[in-house]
Image: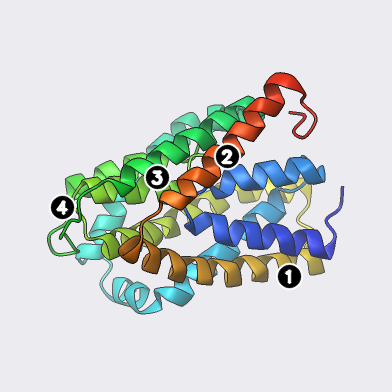
Amino acid sequence: MTLSLWEAIFLGVVQGLTEFLPISSSGHLVLFQRLFGLEEGALTFDILLHLGTLLAVFAVFWRDILDILKNPFGKMGRLIIVGSIPTAMIGFLFKDYFDTAFASGGTLGIEFVITGIVIWWADTARRGFKKEREMGYVDALLIGTLQGAAIMPALSRSGLTIMGALFRGLDREFAAKYSFLMSIPVILGAGVFDISDAMEQGMAIGAPEIFGTLAAAVAGYFAIKYMIALIVKRGMRMFAWYVWLLGGLILLDQLFTQYLFTF
């Protein structure tokens, strides 16, 4: 099925919001792509949506990114590199399993429920004080390992990494900032890894793909701003209730009807 312009914009908004809110972008995209019947030939669009979220990170954190580029082996650069190592290893070793896991509606429902538990648990963490200067490489390795686990569909990358950061005693605002900056090498790496497959499928880029990418960038920008303010002032438990409800509906449908989600 070919994407219409409005379907592409809708999926772009979904990607932009769910990449940075702790509710799993991959899980939502799998869910909506199945509902729209976009099981094949959508890899190019998926890459472009991630490009849109990457633009959102650049727009919000351009000063930090510029500082890192000026001194890539400064403290923040080293923390991102160290955190990216376990993520890359997990992705390389278990990519085939992760791809298979996307095919199961039951798996998707269970992982949404697990994401809700992660969010709730993260919100119980005591307020830490560690920022860039106090954060250590062990912190980065542990957070990067959790980021690797989030390659599984419906496990939220931002939820897992922020949870790990909070339990390692990071300041709440810095925890969100580090989580979002850590997404840059992940998104770039995934794009490089998938681009050869996309070229084999044929990388047709038209108006729906362009507007979907822009929608992801704009939605992602506001999601990052909202998430940073939320984690500092209020917490994230409302998202736990949302993914529990969504996961529960998927599981109930899989068990009894398979009417809404026939996968």
Instruction: Determine the CA span between mark 4 and mark 3.
Output: 23 Å
Q: Nearer the viewer, residue 120 or 185?
A: 120
Query: Disc 3 versus disc 1: distance between alpha carbons?
Result: 31 Å
Residue under the image location 45 percent in, 68 percent down:
226
What percent of the width, then of the height, locates residue 196? Answer: 65, 47
What residue type is disc 3 on? Ile
Instruction: Tell me the element at label 2.
Output: helix
Residue indicated by mark 4: 136
Q: Amino acid at mark 1?
A: Phe
Q: Position of residue 224 (x, y in %)?
A: 46, 67
| Residue pointed to by mark 1 | 211
Q: Residues within 10 Å of mark 4 (few under 14, many from 20)?
A: some
**Residue at mark 2 to residue at mark 4: CA–CA distance:** 37 Å
Quick one: label 1, few (<14), some, or many (20+) residues within 10 Å?
some
The answer to whether residue 205 is above or below residue 155 is: below
Q: Earlier in the sequence, mark 3 or mark 2?
A: 3
**Left or right placement of residue 3 versus residue 62 in this view:** right
Instruction: Look at discs 4 and 3 and give the one toward the viewer.
Output: 3
Residue under pointer 3: 119
Q: On the picture, is 74 further left or further right than 59? A: left
The residue under label 2 is which amino acid type?
Leu
Q: Mark 3 or mark 1: which comes first in sequence?
A: 3
